[in-house]
Image (cartoon, grey):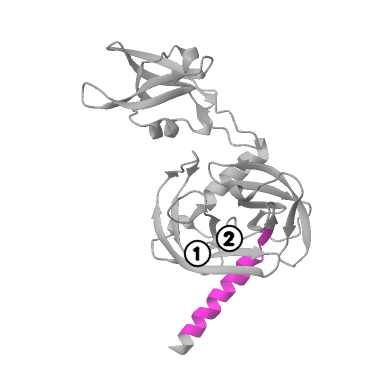
Amino acid sequence: MENELAALSNELAGAVEQAGRAVVAVNARARFASSGVVWRPGVVVTAEHTIRRRDEIGITLPDGRTTSATLAGRDTGTDLAVLKLAENGTPAATFGAPEKLKPGQVVLAIGRSPDSGVNATMGIMSAVSGPWRTWRGGQLDQYLRLDLTLYPASSGGAVVDTAGHVLGIATSALSRIAGLAVPVSTVDRVIDELLRAGHIARGYLGLGLHPVALPDGGTGLIVLSSESDGPAARAGVLIGDILTALAGKPVGDTDDIQTALGGDSVGRPIAARIVRGGQVIELSITVGERPRREE
């Protein structure tokens, strides 16, 4: 039994050592640093909510040296930010297969502190499911809920398997009940878009909507407000209309709208079915890009 425990201990320490070679400390907020992962040569991914300034971002590398980074882009919806290192000599992470994860499997969260170096916490993957929309409006390819301690400096660090392969980015900002791992495929998708455009485009209609019961027992969304020059208003949608379908699918909740309005919908026409005065009307709305907050 003692030998088995020693072997397990050594295996976990080895996983932390391997993953730690690609984990950096990110100094972009007051009081304490967060963590980040060298995802590609010269490219660091971290948690967006830990980036409090655009300039003078300091990075503590795995070998103890410090360097600087510039903010290439950020996405509040997935809580990811992409930084470009002033130098690109640090090896990038190696990746596992989060799509093969099962609830109960052991995982570790690996972070880095400028003072104490690599830090690790251990727990399990408490829940694994399919695509999930965050309360911030982003789309994760998988819902990966963690049952482990995420210290303040852990956000933006690596969630790894027992072989030290990165499964995703740790964040405490996307769920009110537990930390999550943003899966590898989502991180890759967001990196590509942020490096290309600096932000993630999200579609919008320019409507204020609220669920309402329909005479047939179903649910639609009544238009309570409409931006005067918004996409829906330009297509002829009026206050008091009831939206019942979008892109050929019924809508009974505002989450249904967000699901239909992915980034690839911006600039494209989308079919909308509304009820106005008891009459069913079909409209085509050219999806707009949701205005971004100042960063």
Check disc 1 and give the amino acid type.
Thr
> How many numbered circles are shown?
2
User: Which residue is found at the position 51% from the left and 14% from the top?
Assistant: 228
Please name the residue that numbered disc 1 is placed on. 149
Residue at image coords 78%, 52%: 86
- Say if mark 1 contacts mark 2, CB within 8 Å: yes
The image quadrant where one finds the N terminus is bottom left
Main SS of residues in magenta: helix
Q: Is residue 29 above or below residue 72?
A: below
Give how far across and how far down residue 229 sits, in percent. Answer: 54, 15
Q: Residues within 10 Å of mark 2 (few under 14, many from 20)?
A: many
Q: Measured from the top left, where is residue 50 in percent x and y? A: 62, 51
Q: Which residue: 35% across, 32% down? A: 253
**84 or 248: nearer the eye?**
84
- The picture quadrant where one finds residue 292 is top right
Whether residue 247 appears in this view of the structure is no
* Label 2 sits on residue: 154
Q: Taking 136 as reference, is 156 above or below it? A: below
Query: Which element carries disc 1, helix, strand or loop?
Result: loop
- Whole-Å distance between the Cαs marked 1 and 2? 9 Å
